Structure formats: C-alpha cells, structure tokens
Amino acid sequence: MNTRRFKLKNNTSVRCCPQCGNNQVFTAHSDYCAEDCCEVWVVCKCGYDPTSEKSGFRLEDVWGGVDDANIMDALSCWNDALSAEEKQLTEEREGA
Ligand SMILES: [Zn+2]
C-alpha cells in the first residue's frame, strides 16, 4: 500500500470534511483491490474516509499510485462520496 500526505492551496473545489471542516490536508492511499486493479482514495487529516463503506467511490486504476493526477481524480471521488452521503442523510431525515 502506498500513501502520500499532501496539502492543497486554499480552494473551494474540494468539499470540506464533515467531521473537522478541513479541505486542504489529506493522505492519499493506493492499494490493490484485485490482481490487475488498484484503488486510490484520499483520507482527511482527521482520519475521516467517506469511501470506507462506499468503496464504489474509490478511483480504480490499473497501476494505482499516488501521483498528482491520481490525487486529483481521487479528490473528485471524495467530492462525489460526500455528495452521496449528504443525499443519503437528507433522505433518512425526510424518511424517504
Ligand atoms: Zn476531517
């Protein structure tokens, strides 16, 4: 498993962590999920990982790795996973 801690500049494109509000400091993870496939995902500095129960939101890549391109893609997965989570919570609240 590869990991890489990184810090982004001030930005509004990455959703804030629902636990601590951070949207700049993350650790990228890359690990094999199958023989010829890797998953890449980002975890907040507080340890929050919206994909831990939603691995469908992890980036799948043949080679994996935590280079800049994969990190950018994994951040858009982070955004998607958080949107999905928000939607789920809203639905639960509304009893849908
Ligand atoms: Zn956090």
Image (spheres, rainbow, N blue to C red):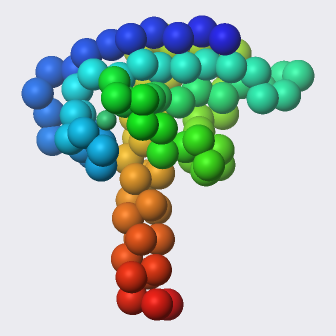
Q: Describe residue 53's horizontal placement relative to residue 45 as left or right.
A: right
In x, y percent, where is residue 66? 51, 13
Q: Residue at x 30, y 44 (%)?
A: 19
Residue at the spot 61% in from the left edge and 19% down from the top edge: 30
Q: Position of residue 29 (x, y in %)?
A: 55, 20
Is residue 73 at all visible to an observer of this figure?
A: no
Compared with 2, 95 (above or below) is below
Number of numbered discs present?
Answer: 0
Q: Position of residue 38 (x, y in %)?
A: 71, 24
Left or right: where 14 falls relative to 53: left
Residue at 45% across / 61% down in the picture? 85
Quadrant housing the N terminus = top right
Q: Where residue 12 sits: x, y (%)?
A: 15, 41
Q: Residue furthest right?
A: 35
State which image quarter holds ligand 1.
Answer: top left
> In the displayed image of the protein, which residue is found farthest to the left?
10
Rendered view: 73 above or below 53: above
**In this view of the protein, which residue sits in the foreground, 39 or 17?**
17
Indicate whether 3 appears above or below 47: above
Q: In which image quadrant can residue 16 be found? A: top left
Instruction: Look at 14% across and 33% down and name the residue there.
Output: 11
- Residue 22 shows in the view: yes
